[in-house]
Image (cartoon, rainbow, N blue to C red):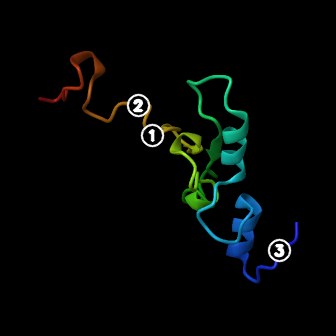
Amino acid sequence: MVTEAVNHDPAATFLLTGSHVAGRPSMGVWLSYGLGSMNRDLPLFCVLVTKGKGGQPLPERLWGSGFLSARHLGVQLRAGVDTVLILNDPPGLDRRTGGACSTL
């Protein structure tokens, strides 16, 4: 791939979104937009985070949905116990009691 960008950041943005300007949909978003999904319960695509590197090495704008709907946004998978943050209940909350705090 060839780009006219003189710095690394605009070149990485071009590589992942097809444009030097931030805010455009990424390749994964365009694929999910065009191809859809065979299962509505699974994310359209996932973004992997490097373990022990202090979080996502790529800014979200490089894998974000840009001007397309947020339903095409990738789901960030983290290293560790809570791979996807919204799947487990926060400490102190219990589903059996309807979300009431179990310490009260």
Query: Where is residue 8 drawn, in percent x and y?
Result: 72, 76
Residue ID for mark 2: 88
Q: How many marks?
A: 3
- State the SS at label 3: loop
Which residue is farthest right?
A: 1
Give whichever of 59, 32 is nearer the camera: 32
Q: Residue at x 69, y 74 (%)?
A: 10
What amino acid type is highlighted by mark number 2?
Answer: Asn
Q: CA distance from mark 1 to mark 2?
A: 7 Å
Tell me which residue sits at (67%, 54%) in the image.
Answer: 26
Instruction: Say which amino acid is labelled 1.
Output: Leu
Query: Mark 1 and 2 residues: CB-CB less than 8 Å, in contact?
Result: yes
Query: Residue 86's x, y, as percent?
Result: 42, 36
Left-right relation of 7 to 25: right
Q: Earlier in the sequence, mark 1 or mark 3?
A: 3
Q: Which residue is mark 3?
A: 3
Splitting the image into 4 quarters, where does residue 74 fall?
top right
Residue 44 sits above or below residue 96 on the image: below
Above or below, comparing residue 37 to residue 64 in the picture: above
Q: Are marks 1 and 3 in contact (CB under 8 Å)?
A: no
Eyeballing the image, is 19 above or below 99? below
Count neighbours of disc 2 (C-alpha within 10 A) and say few if under 14, some if 14 to 19, many if 20 or more: few
Q: Which residue is mark 1?
A: 85
Quadrant for the C terminus in the image:
top left
Secondary structure beneath dot 1 equals loop
Q: Secondary structure at mark 2?
A: loop
In the rendered image, the residue lying farthest to the bottom is 6
